[in-house]
Structures are given as structure tokens and as C-alpha cells.
Image (cartoon, coloured by chain):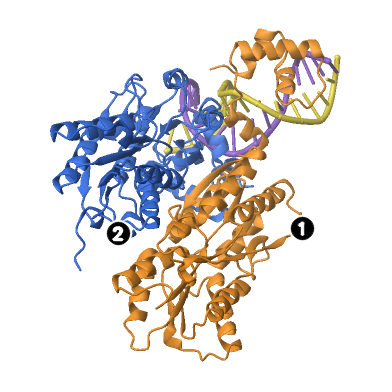
Chain colours: A orange, B blue, C purple, D yellow
Amino acid sequence: MTTIQKVAKEAGVSVATVSRVLNKSDRVAPKTKSIVEETIKRLKYQPNMLGRNLRRSESRMILALLPSISNPFYTMIIKGIEDVARENEYNVLLCQTNSELERELVYINLLKQRLADGLISLDPTININVLRGVSQDYPIVQSCEYSEELNLPYVTIDNFQAGYQAVKHLISIGKKKIALINSDNKFIYARLRQKGYLKALEEAGLGINEDFIINGENDFESGQKSMQQLLARKDRPDAVFLVSDVLAIGALKTIRDMKLSVPEDIAVVGFDNIEFAIRMNPALTTIAQPMYEIGRESCRLLINRIVNKDVEIEKIIMDFELIIRESTMKQVE
Amino acid sequence: MTTIQKVAKEAGVSVATVSRVLNKSDRVAPKTKSIVEETIKRLKYQPNMLGRNLRRSESRMILALLPSISNPFYTMIIKGIEDVARENEYNVLLCQTNSELERELVYINLLKQRLADGLISLDPTININVLRGVSQDYPIVQSCEYSEELNLPYVTIDNFQAGYQAVKHLISIGKKKIALINSDNKFIYARLRQKGYLKALEEAGLGINEDFIINGENDFESGQKSMQQLLARKDRPDAVFLVSDVLAIGALKTIRDMKLSVPEDIAVVGFDNIEFAIRMNPALTTIAQPMYEIGRESCRLLINRIVNKDVEIEKIIMDFELIIRESTMKQVE
DNA sequence: TTGTAGGCGTTATCAC
DNA sequence: GTGATAACGCCTACAA
């Protein structure tokens, strides 16, 4: 293996000089510099990051904790995180927790073992007290899902407003019996979107039917099942707001199986605007979050904190957008 | 920060002893051991992996090179890789190359910089000669996509047989004008599946129409466009085999837009059996690969090679399965 | 401008 | 069974 020692010897200089050339910081004579650079190239020398990392006491690795990369919701967020990381010469370790506490702890240990410099939490099942403890010692940023109790930076959208707008839209196209298929209320986004849903109904003078609110997992399966449950009722809803496109895609399958039509029998609004949303049959009305930007901002905040532990704690609210498609529109024949 | 030194001092032993306890390899007196363990717990000591990695000259990090995690095709493969990695105390860095050479090179540099111990290549756009050069110095395994020229371990399925079976199925349901929407022929899987397609047609005495074979990108967009191209023809096909479900989903959208029915007007067979396939309208007939197992095997081979550079070069062919669904079946009303 | 040398935290080879 | 101590490869005062 070519080490900095060999380069130094070969170039007839000290390791310090080679190191200076490598880190282009210090002043080094142009002539010496070119000799060293030539030698580096000739010996195909690449610095051993294991040595550098130990010396600098950093890993230049960022953790992104998420339940599963299979959820298309995370795709663009991850891309945003990775882009900013790369711009700042960090690598990103995607940590699939499968929402299991045990896995989360394994990854959080990477921080303690110095294998990662910071962590972006995208969906914590973790005990809030554990997170609080860790966040005192290591840089942590919350993305999308967050806890106000923790005084940590986060990036999110106004989920209350988003839920409110989604349901207002359904009301505006004449729907009166609007159901909500939500994920677990342990999530702050779930609680906020539900609040928005309730506010919109109240404002429109539509009564609230508790049976029209269903909480469950956030996957296809659950979307299908929850929809079945709603459609089995005598007084079935004429519209449904689902807190994710994945849920909505599951629901669309159920609706199709029951030979009902969208949006005539049931209008459907999803959330996230994942790639598939526009390709569904019918194309899905949904709330678009600026996922790429959310990812970028999250990573920016984290790196700020890694570089300067005492930087101001930013809390960023991004804009969202309601995208109206076939699932709430009369089809043009 | 708690270091091994502090633990040693606190426990009244030498760092060597603490290290022995940590690595549970060497014999150490039960009494000493328990004192050290107690001290470790009390001081909440966690070994600094930066130090260990430098000393051991390993990073315990595995690279998985793939174009994009957004392609659901990779989801279960990645899970398989990660599971085996974790079982062997490795971490996996998912490297999205976006099929750009430049990015691939960045990640391959991580090997040279000792930040990774090995690499699983899932879709190389990289120059074969570059890969050959790297593979002499570092452990590399090819997964799904591979090059026979490189004498490297790989895990894949019999893509020729798979293409052959898919098209035979279409023939068996009475289709005669069968098109192929393929990805780029630079991929070995693309060439093999095409060969299978041709063989099935020839065997059935169906002529080959060059215009029925379309090569393009492997994404929704391309599936949509290629299908448009086929349906614009006067003698349009009555069936199409697409080399990925993602392409097929795009194609289904086009077919729907044109108000044609599946499978009556056009039967559709995809490839990969991604999660969405069964949830499409109509549900998609497809070839299922044992993706999770492919991932596991790939990682197993890689770790074998990391541990022992001179281990036998295994080449593993896994089984596939044709899954018949609505897109090639008369709908039961 | 350049070189010397200490140390980052760990493991592993010697002695004892 | 245990303890010194020398690496691993790099960076960075401090000297020169």
C-alpha cells in the first residue's frame, strides 16, 4: 500500500509537506508542490481515510434513519440529503429501521462509536427520552416527523393546513360524506392532518362521523383494508382523504374491486405526490410536499450543527401544494 | 470522551486487558473480566471505531452500487444484502450512481481510500476495463447484471429462459403479434431476454418483425412512449413483453389512454414482480426473481472474498417464476 | 518554507 | 494471565 511516508521519501520531502499539499491549506513552495503532486500521481497515492478520520476525529458519515426505502415517499428526500452531503464531502448511510426500536438503537450506536458524525431522523419510533439523551451529545435533525418537546432543528410542512386544504377541496366538488384514512396517531403529522380534516368539516357545517375516521398502518395493505371497512357500511362515504399516496393506491384497488367509480361514487385525495400517483388509474389528486428541498434543508441544518455545535436551532416550515387530478375530477371523455 | 485508557486506569488494569475483554478472544481471568466489564458499563464506554478500523485496517463497510433506490426492483435485493451484512457486522452504503460514470468513480474511490472493504455492483455503466482493474485489488461481486469477461463472482437468474417462458406464455393464450419493449442492449439481461423472446417466436413459427422490438430506458416514461410507438402502427401488436414491471406500468397507462383493453386487445407481461405489480389495474403478469435471496447470496459471496481473497469464484444462477395475473387472463366478471 | 515529533484510540506482539 | 509498547496512517503544533 502506498502511504504518505512512501510519497514523502520518494519525493524527497517530509510527510508534513506531503500532507500540506494534500490539504492545500498551508503555503508550500510551488516547486516543492509540483514535485509532490507529480509523485502522488506517479505512485497512484490515495490518502487512507481510516488514518485521517482517526486523526481528525470525524467519519464524514451522516446517518439517515427511515423505516424503509421501499416507501417512494422518501426517494426525493434522500436525494436531497445525499446531494447536500456530497457537496460537503460527506457520505450518507441509509438506515432502514423497519420501525423497530432495536434497529434504531444499533444505528444510533454508530454515533457513539464515532462511525457517524450526525443523524437525520425521518420517522422515529424511538422513545423520545432516548432521543433527547442522544441529542445532547450528537448532532441530530428531525425531518418531516418531529417532536416539539425536543428542542431540535426540524424541517417540515404545515400538516394542519395541508389536511384542511385537502378536505376543503373535496367539499368544493360537492362531497358531503368525507372519510379519513389516517396512519397511527402517534405521528404528529397524523394528528395535525386529522385536525385539518376536522376543521374543514366543521367549517362547512358537515357533521363528524367517528366511524369515518380510520387509523392504521401506512402501507398498501392497510389502505385496501380500511377502504373495505368503509365501503362495507350502509351509509358509505362519497369521498375519502388518505394521508399518503401509498394508502390511496391500496384504496383505489378496493374501490375497483367493488366496481365503484372514482370520483363519481367516491372521490379520493392522497398525500405526497409520489411518482406513481400520476400513473394510477385514475390519476391521483394529492398534496405535494417539496421533498427534495426538505431533504436538502435537513442535511444543511445537520452539517451546520456538525461544524458548529452551538449554531442556532432552526425550525423550517416548507410550502406544500394541492395537485388536482382525475380522482377528484369528472373525467373528460 | 471515554477511551480505553480511562477504562483501564479506572479498572486498575492495562489497556491490553481491556482490549482482550472487548474482543472476548484471549483468555482473561474471570475476576479481572468482571471488573473490566463493570467498569465499561459504569463509564458507558463504547470503543472508538475510528481507532479500531485504522488498527485493523478495515472499515467493515460494504458498498452497493445501483442506479437509483427509487426503482422498486432493488428493494428486496438491498434488504437481502443488508441482512447478511448485519449478521456479519458490516454496514452497507447504498450508492446511487444515477448511471453516471463520474458518480461510480467517486464510490469506487471509497474502496481505494479504505472507507469500504468491498463492493456489490448491481448495474455497472462503468467501463469494463476500469472494473477489471479495480477488481484485482478489491473484493467485488456482481449481482443481477454481470460481465462474463470479468472473472468475478456473480449472482443472477437465467434471463434467456425467463424471456423464453414469458413469450411462450403469451403464445399459449393465442397471441400472434407479440412485441418486445426492452431496455438498452448494453445490458446482458436485455440481450438474453431478447434472445429468449426470439427463440419462442421462432419455435412457434411466428415471424419476427424488427419494428416490434423497441429498446429504450428502463423507466415509466420510456414504457409509456414505447407503447405509444407500437400502438400508433397500423398492424399493432396483440401482446407485449416488457423487460421490467416499471416499463409495463408505463405501458398500461398508454393502453388505458388509448381506450384499449387488457388482455383482450393487448396482453401484457412484465418482469420483476415488484410490489406494485399485483396492485395495478389490471394486475400484472410478470416474472418473479427471488430478489431477497439474490441479495443475500451476493453479500455472502462478497464477505467470503473480503475474509479470504483466494476463495473460489462462485457464479450462482437462481430460479425464477412466471406469475400469471389479469393482464394475460380473461377477466372473470 | 520545511522538518521533527507527538498523538488520535485501538490492537497485537512481546515479555514477564 | 497480564502489562508495556510498538505500530496503523495521518495531521499539526512547534522548531528550525
Q: Position of residue B183 (x, y in %)?
A: 38, 36
Q: Name the residue located 38 percent from the left edge and 47 percent from the top edge.
A: B246
C2 up-or-down from A306: above or below: above
Quadrant in which the C terminus of chain B appears? bottom left
Marks 2 and 1 in Cβ contact (< 8 Å): no
Q: Position of residue A216 (x, y in %)?
A: 41, 73
Q: Mark 1, chain letter?
A: A
Q: Which mark is on residue A58? A: none
A179 up-or-down from A144: above or below: below
The image quadrant of residue B192 is top left
Secondary element at image label 2? loop
Q: Residues within 10 Å of mark 1 (few under 14, many from 20)?
A: few
The image quadrant of residue D8 is top right
Q: Name the residue located 55 percent from the left edge and 31 percent from the top edge.
A: B54
Q: Amino acid at mark 1?
A: Glu
In front: A111, or A38? A38
On the question of residue A138 being in view, the answer is no
| Whole-number angstrom distance, CA of label 2 to CA of label 1 | 52 Å
Give the foreground label among 2 and 1. Answer: 2
Q: Name the residue located 72 percent from the left edge and 10 percent from the top edge.
A: A35
Horizontal placement of A85 versus B85: left or right?
right
Q: Residue furthest front?
A: B234
On the question of residue B221 being in view, the answer is yes
Q: Which mark is on residue A312? A: 1
Q: Which residue is mark 2?
A: B282
